Image: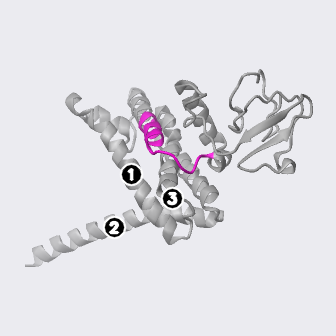
Amino acid sequence: MYCPKCGQNISNGEGREYCGHCGQKLSGYQGDEPIDPMEAGLSAESSVSDPVNSGQVRITEFSSPWEDESSVSFVRGLILTINQTLFHPSDFFRYMPRSGGQMLPVLYSLILGIIGAIFGLLSEFFAESPVMTHGNLVRNMAISSILVLPLLIVFEVYVGSLILHLSMIVFGARKENFTTTLKIISYSSSPNIFYGVPFIGWLVAAVWSLWITVVGIRVTGGVSLGRAILAAIAPAVLLIVIFAGMIFFLISLIGFSSLV
């Protein structure tokens, strides 16, 4: 069986809702020959003829496993979404729903944040991380304060989404609404699973998450790669400049006080 979107061979594909390669939603497709979706001219919701079996193949463009609660189980939706965002982010964001509630994307980020914290905590048994990750935070917090971690993750999602949304507006990369930006931030948390890699897990997670964010901006905003990179890194650069300015200001105050 072949996926009607990416053309990849799907082993034991009968009864599956999503392609494991690109994440395309499959609704009763049983074709044994690949279909070129570009030649088929698929729209948001369209149908193409099955070259082998009789009938039509229904293609639903705007769908994602995690947000499709009606046909995908919790665990399967989580695994498929992690796979798609890590290895096929361009396809994932192209077919990601632009509307809908914010609860499921935030929940996804919360789950991946907690998984990252647990993996980071476990990696501390093998190597000390050079940065303050969620795993370090959990280890250094009192047991009674661990409940703060979910609140911290949700806070990071909304603040990060707001800053990124403003940055996308400044660089002309905002084509969709705030919910779409929040989804970009939420689904870019998939690399948190690499916090469990000793020494370099935090770096792999940070770089990979940034790349997923860049791809999400480029696809949903319909802009060039360069503009998407600028929109993604501008908030971090701004925070660094503000932090450096505060340090310089404090040093100046200390120096002035010593002279007085």
- Say whether residue 20 is left or right of residue 99: right
Instruction: Find out whether residue 87 is within the magenta segment.
Output: no
Q: Residue at x 62, y 59 (%)?
A: 218
Q: Nearer the viewer, mark 3 or mark 2?
A: 3
Identify the residue shown where x is 64% and y is 45%: 62
The dot on residue 177 is 3
Residue type, label 1: Tyr
Q: Position of residue 2 (x, y in %)?
A: 83, 32
Q: Which residues are magenta?
A: 96-112
Residue 73, given in percent of the width and then of the height, sits at 56, 25
Q: Residue 193 in the image: x percent, y percent?
A: 50, 34
Residue identifier under label 1: 158
In terms of depth relative to the viewer, which is nearer, 177 or 22? 177
Q: Is residue 199 visible?
A: no
Residue 148 lies in quadrant:
top left
Question: Viewed as shown, does residue 169 lie left or right of 46?
Answer: left
Q: Judge the density around disc 3: few (<14), some (14-19), many (≥20) Cα neighbours within 10 Å.
A: few
Q: Secondary structure at mark 1?
A: helix
Would residue 209 be seen by someone viewing this image from the given angle?
yes
The three-letter code of the residue at mark 3 reads Asn
- Residue under numbered circle 2: 242
> How does the figure colour the protein chain or chains?
one colour
Amino acid carrying label 2: it is: Ile
Quarter of the picture containing the N terminus is: top right
